[in-house]
Each structure stands twice: as structure tokens, then as C-alpha cells.
Image: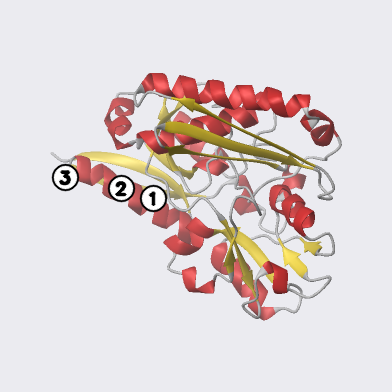
Amino acid sequence: MKTVIRLGTRRSALSLWQAKHVAGLIQARDPAVQVDIQQYRTLSDQNPAAPLRSLGRQGVFTDALEAALRAREIDCAAHSLKDLPVEMPPGLALAAVTKRGDHRDALVSRQRLALSQLPVGARIGTGSLRRRAQLLALRPDLKMRPIRGNVPTRLEKLKAADEYDAIVLAAAGLNRLGLSAQISETFDESQMLSAAGQGALAIQCRAGDAWLHFFQPLADWRATQATAAERAFLHALDAGCSLPVAAYSHVREGRLVLQARVTALDGARQVDVSGSAITDAGPAGVIQAEELGAELAQAAREQGADRILESIEFGADE
């Protein structure tokens, strides 16, 4: 009798791509396993027109999947790691972070123009306070316009209505859906620092479940350490993924390097911190990465990050 793993996902095209990718990793590990993909509508999916900040809490992209895990309807869930709250709900565990895709943000403009080429007062569509703040730090003349929907929906909104001159999306999502040709410009870290965990996929399951040990070998240690540092920075600032806080880490010449940024909503003030640490490749390296994230969060506090965050209303990164 074939072993079946029930894998939960959201219903968007990108979420289904991610679920199928994770299913492929599972079956590469054990070809005898059958993966049954089950689709759910999260709070954000049930309120497609509402600004995410109006939904009022963390986990709007993950709530239905986590409920299904607790109810034992599924054995694991596939998430974009940047959507997963930095504090894991009781009874659930982050089983694996798989090899990371492109972490960067990308501009898609109506006339294929780069950010510097857009006219004065250009209208940019984004639902992310992090992107909004950093864009205004680069160009205070820009006009920010809210936008909701999955990747194809937002691209259609850009093309169909004269409401936006450009929108900003995660490069990984565009690449995974075969839409990289739509990108007008990909931002480097000096322009726009990405969300913690952006470009990485997470497998979540029940804490203590027998499947936890099955999924752990699917993890990529570089992505695991890098995203652990990024998420620790957010957690230490009590910022989650809902405020204009950015963090990106990677391994360079045997060291884990972390860059992080807190930006005022109008872009007028920005706190940048960076640091590095030698880390082990095993579980101890995750603890070392988290320590680096916490250290940089303290450095950011000393430079006024708390004052910036206290002045900002609740929002969400999408």
C-alpha cells in the first residue's frame, strides 16, 4: 500500500506551483510516496478587495492551512516563507526551508521603464509598507497606490486600467510562473532590501509529528541559516512581516552576512545595519544565525528603529 502525504496549499497559481515543487522534492526523496495536494482559502483569499491591514492580524496568508494542520486534515503545508509569521503557533513546526530562489523585488512598468525613467509623480501599485517606504526613500515624488490580488491578477490590473504606471512584485514569483519577461527592473540591495524569507519556500507540519523527520532532509542549510537570521531580526524588533522592515542574509566566503533595514513610511528616514558571523553547517549554525539577527536588531534599536516603527500603523507585506 502506497504511503500518502497530504500537502496543503493556497489556491493561487503561484501557491500551486510551490506545492507541486515541494511535492517533487518529497517524491525525489522517496518515490514510493504519493503526494495529495489539498487547496484552501486563507483569510486574505476570502477578502480579496480588503486592504490587508484592515484584516487586523498576522497569518492572513496561512491561517486556513495552519487550522487544517491542527485538525489533521493535512500532514504538511507549503508556504512562501515570507508569509509565515516569525513566531510559530503552538503545536506547529517549521520542518524545512528548501533551496532559495531569487530574493529580490522587481518593477513591472507599463512602458518597460526602469524606476529612474518613470515620470515625476508616477503611480506605483503595492500593498507592502516595506516596498512603499523604500520606494519613497529612492524617489519621494512617487505616488503610492494600493493593489491586491495574486501575481496574474496584479499584472492584469496594471495592463487594464490607467491607475498604475508600475507595480512591484517579488522576482521569484514572476520567475516561477514563467513571467520573468515582464520585469522592467530587478532591484539590488542598495535600492530595495527584500522581505525576510523572500524567495524561500517553507514546509510546515505539526510539532513532534513523525513526518517532521521525513521533511527535514529536504532543507537547504544555506537558505535555512540565512532566513533564520532574517526572521530573528524581525522577531527581535517585534515587527513580524507587517511593517517596513527588510532583511537579507547569505553565505559569503564561509561567513553568514546579514543586511537589515527599517524605513520610515514616507521614506524620509532609514536605519541600515549589517554584520556577519562564522556559522556551522548543522543545527548549531541556525542558533548562531539567530544570534546574529538579534544582535543587529539591537544595533538598529540603538539607531532609532523603535521610534520609526512606533510611528507606523499596522500594515502588511504581500
> Would you say 280 lies left or right of 147 here?
left
Number of callouts: 3
Which residue is identified by label 1? 19
Residue 221 appears in the rendering: yes
**Amino acid marked by disc 2:** Ala
| Residue 39 vs residue 170, the one in the foreground | 170
Q: Position of residue 230 (x, y in %)?
A: 56, 34
Give the Cα separation between the discs numbered 1 and 3: 17 Å
Give the Cα separation between the discs numbered 2 and 3: 11 Å
Q: Secondary structure at mark 2?
A: helix
What colouring style does the render use?
Answer: secondary structure
> Would you say 33 lies left or right of 201 here?
left
Which residue is identified by label 2? 23
Q: Are marks 1 and 2 in contact (CB under 8 Å)?
A: yes
Of pointers 2 and 3, the one earlier in the residue sequence: 2
Q: Position of residue 139 (x, y in %)?
A: 79, 61
Of pointers 1 and 3, the one earlier in the residue sequence: 1
